[in-house]
Amino acid sequence: MDKTSLEFLVEASKILNSTLDVRTLVGLVYDLIIAAVGCETCSLGRLGEKGEKIHVLLGFGNSSPDISRLIVEETRGVMGEVVRTRKPLVLNDPGQVSEYEDAIDRAFKVKKQNALAVPLMRGGEVIGALEAINKQKGDFTARDREMLMALSEQIAIALDNARLYGRVTREIKERELLYEVGGRISSSLDLNEVLVLILNSLRKLVDFNAAGIYLVDPETTDIMALTVRGYDPDMESRVELKFGKGVVGWVAKNVEPVIIDDVSKDTRYLNARDETRSEIVVPLVAAGKIVGVLNLESDDLEAFDEEALYLLNTFGSQAALTIERAKLHLEILEKRRLEGEIELARRIQKTFLPAALPEIPGYDLSAMNLPSEEVSGDYYDVIDVAAGQWGIVIADVFGKGIPASLVMAAFRASLLAEIRNNYAITTIMSKVNRLMWESVEPERCVTACYGVLDADARVLTYSNAGHFYPMVIGRGGVKRLTKGGMLLGAVEDLHYGEERLHLEQGDLILFFTDGLTEAMDRQGEAFGEERLIELGQSVIDLPCSDIVKRIYHDIVNFADGKLIDDFTLLVIKVR
């Protein structure tokens, strides 16, 4: 290989290593292939995860989401041939070219005069192919083949690195998203609302064109469509759901997930939607029993893979628990609840909250806790840690009512135990998180903010575990207490940060739960953090007891007297 070719390959390596974004990389590949062999255009394909079909990344110089849906069979076309044989292919005769027509050729209808294709190899395995089309001057030569083979090695490495980076990045985002949507779907006890939240949340995890959630009764073998989206209502009524029949019925009976790359080739598929090409169905299992089935359908072939299955299985576990919880809540409402148990829970919970706030020299304190149901999932306290040292805590459990209050009892006990052990704040939060992870269900996570006030030094050291940011409102502005980490109980081992704040005379500290900022007016607009800040600034000179009353009064008026969530507020002011 001559010096000019070697210099080109060195420069190409630098260019290909300049990005890990696949879309950007494909554009660079196009320019390099054109420059390397002097062709008019080119195509690039990558084998799918299952290694059976070539997914087009670049077709005749075009790349877009629509292009990526093009699939070439491994046994068809120029790229299919080089993937199958693992050898380069040179076609300088138009008659030969026409014999290798594939899906890309049919899609773009470009007149091919000649073509040069080489396999993309990585670690001794074929991962795809690239094709140079229509040499601008003359025929493709042995030098062109040598150049394209050398360039393909660098392209294969770059594509593999981009895919690995994309996978790792996607997994991190998906993990974060699972926690987010898990919390979202666990935020309601209304079954219909939960089902809508589940389908809305699914959109963030997996792409689909139609979806259905079905309730399964394993004792009666009844299957009932709870909610569906994307189907023709007339077609739905003609599809009979039976235990063991159809893909949904099969999954309900066997309690096993199913991925169907092509529904036309699966005899179990019952046609409820003419556009559907592929399908994924997973069982929803809670406490070892199937409670429902989640079905997603796509207009594209092979739309779902093992990664989608993992996400749906993980999400399905949360959804099953949420559905069961919502069903249980409906049953409780139907039975009007046993008044004696509720009253007992209310009495017990009263013991969790301070009967009166302590008097701290140099500070004014006041608080309010009003449950939206019989009992609250919120908690606050001011704890005598040591001489002049006061522990300040506010917390909120996902959900409402008795279940949330029981989880809060576990959180309170864990927190007090760790405080008594004299650990640092970050250690306390990490240990409480571990205890919550071990002792409560995944959908019962807790958000909390715990800090220690050094009254004499006017220093507040705190750590926030996923809670709505408490705020310090002072003459100089507003400081939000953001330092900390994730909510408690979601992940086994977590480290939490902390921050020290020096307080000034007149500073007003607001600790609150989402019942304040998420209170809504008749138009569905939330009260919001900014209104709370403005309200705090307007009443900063009042005594804390009056500040609490004023905030409660304004929020209740804003919500037209209807607070749908627990209302908890703790106010501390530096005198």
Image (cartoon, rainbow, N blue to C red):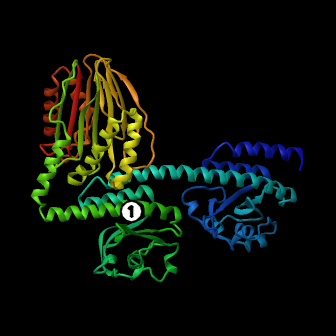
**Where is 249 relative to 333, above or below?**
below
* Along the line of sight, the residue nearer the viewer: 169 or 4: 169
Q: Position of residue 70 (x, y in %)?
A: 59, 65
Pointer 1 local density, CA inside 10 Å: few below 14, some 14–19, many at least 20: some
Residue 106, visible in the rendered structure: no
Q: Quadrant of the C terminus?
A: top left
User: Is 136 on the left or on the right of 289, as rendered?
Assistant: right
User: Is 298 on the left or on the right of 400, as rendered?
Assistant: right
* Along the line of sight, the residue nearer the viewer: 100 or 259: 259
Residue 528 occupies which quadrant of the picture? Answer: top left
Which residue is pictured at 76% across the width and 54% down the height?
153
Q: Position of residue 370 (x, y in %)?
A: 15, 42
Residue 125, visible in the rendered structure: yes
Which residue is pictured at 30% across the width and 33% down the height?
470
Which residue is pictured at 50% across the width and 49% down the height?
172
Q: Position of residue 540 (x, y in %)?
A: 21, 22
* Along the line of sight, the residue nearer the viewer: 284 or 10: 284
